[in-house]
């Protein structure tokens, strides 16, 4: 689980909280080589300049996780993924939904990027029926059967997912915190998430809201490197 992906690429920094792509690209410049992998979500896409941002990040050799969390009927999801494929190059795209919608997304990606399924958002503390871990396991099984390359899950479910599905599926873990200070209910630390088997951790606010984002990003990269050196 700790092999294959370079330690630096294990941190995916969420480019949220920026009102324009100019601001986002200035910010990316200030972080320099400390961050190699960015997550671009609905917030920056809604500026109308999402594809320009993806092209600019690609030109700087940054890897990109396009987190659009597409959710619709299979035909619409498939057609949307096809459109996105024609407009941009990136690494991962998120889709939310049932087996047929996920399978439509995988077909439309034509292997040019990896489709990741969202299981249960880490801002959700409890679900209406059954146990959270059962829901995450069931949705993961569905996603993998549909051909997805991996899933988004909280660090609290990762060990159980690794036990059941082995090392192959990508597991990406957001909701990385030391204390429960904001909207996430199912948080884990950098070390806990990686040791539980996450391939990547997604971190947004703890970096971009810190007083010195490049220092914070650097500190987190050192902690990731330490876990990778002594798994
Ligand atoms: O700022 P923070 O570290 O909470 O950033 C989390 C990022 O991860 C946000 O962009 C949010 O959209 C995303 N997220 C996610 N899936 C979850 C929880 C958060 O993609 N289950």
Image (spheres, grey):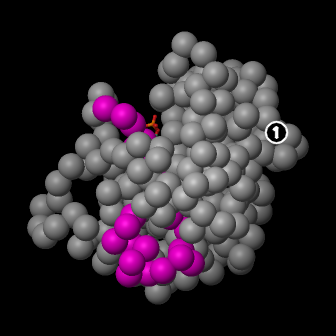
Quadrant holding ligand 1?
Answer: top left
Q: 59 above or below 147?
A: above
Residue 178 magenta: yes
Q: Residue at x 52, y 46 (%)?
A: 202
Q: How many C-alpha atoms fall within 10 Å of the one at disc 1: few (<14), some, or many (≥20)?
A: some
Residue nearer the viewer, 128 or 46? 128
Quarter of the rendering occupied by the N terminus? bottom right
Q: Residue at x 51, y 39 (%)?
A: 203
Q: 50 above or below 139?
A: above
Q: Quadrant of residue 133?
A: bottom left
Residue nearer the viewer, 67 or 71? 67
Name the spot of residue 195 as percent of width and height, x first: 47, 57
Which residue lies most toward the bottom here?
A: 145
Residues drawn in magenta: 158-179
Q: 25 above or below 93?
A: above
Name the spot of residue 193 as percent of width and height, x first: 44, 53
Q: Is mark 1 within 8 Å of ligand 1?
A: no
Observer able to see residue 14 = no
Q: 5 above or below 223?
A: below
Label 1 belongs to which residue?
56
Q: Residue at x 26, y 43 (%)?
A: 185
């Amino acid at each position: 689980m700790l092999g294959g992906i370079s330690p630096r690429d294990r941190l995916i920094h969420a480019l949220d909280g920026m009102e324009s792509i100019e601001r986002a690209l200035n910010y990316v410049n200030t972080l320099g080589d400390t961050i190699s992998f960015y997550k671009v979500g609905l917030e920056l896409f809604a500026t109308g300049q999402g594809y320009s941002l993806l092209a600019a990040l690609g030109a700087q050799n940054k890897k990109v996780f396009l987190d659009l969390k597409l959710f619709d009927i299979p035909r619409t999801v498939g057609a949307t993924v096809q459109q996105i494929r024609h407009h941009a190059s990136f690494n991962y795209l998120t889709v939310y939904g049932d087996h047929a919608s996920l399978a439509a997304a995988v077909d439309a990606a034509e292997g040019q990027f990896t489709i990741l399924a969202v299981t249960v958002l880490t801002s959700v503390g409890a679900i209406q029926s059954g146990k959270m871990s059962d829901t995450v396991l069931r949705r993961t099984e569905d996603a993998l059967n549909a051909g997805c390359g991996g899933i988004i899950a909280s660090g609290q479910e990762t060990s159980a997912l690794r036990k059941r599905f082995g090392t192959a599926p990508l597991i990406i873990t957001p909701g990385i915190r030391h204390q429960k200070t904001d909207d996430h209910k199912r948080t884990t630390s950098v070390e806990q998430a990686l040791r539980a088997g996450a391939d990547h951790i997604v971190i947004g606010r703890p970096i971009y809201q810190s007083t010195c984002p490049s220092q914070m990003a650097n500190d987190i990269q050192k902690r990731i490197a330490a876990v990778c050196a002594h798994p």
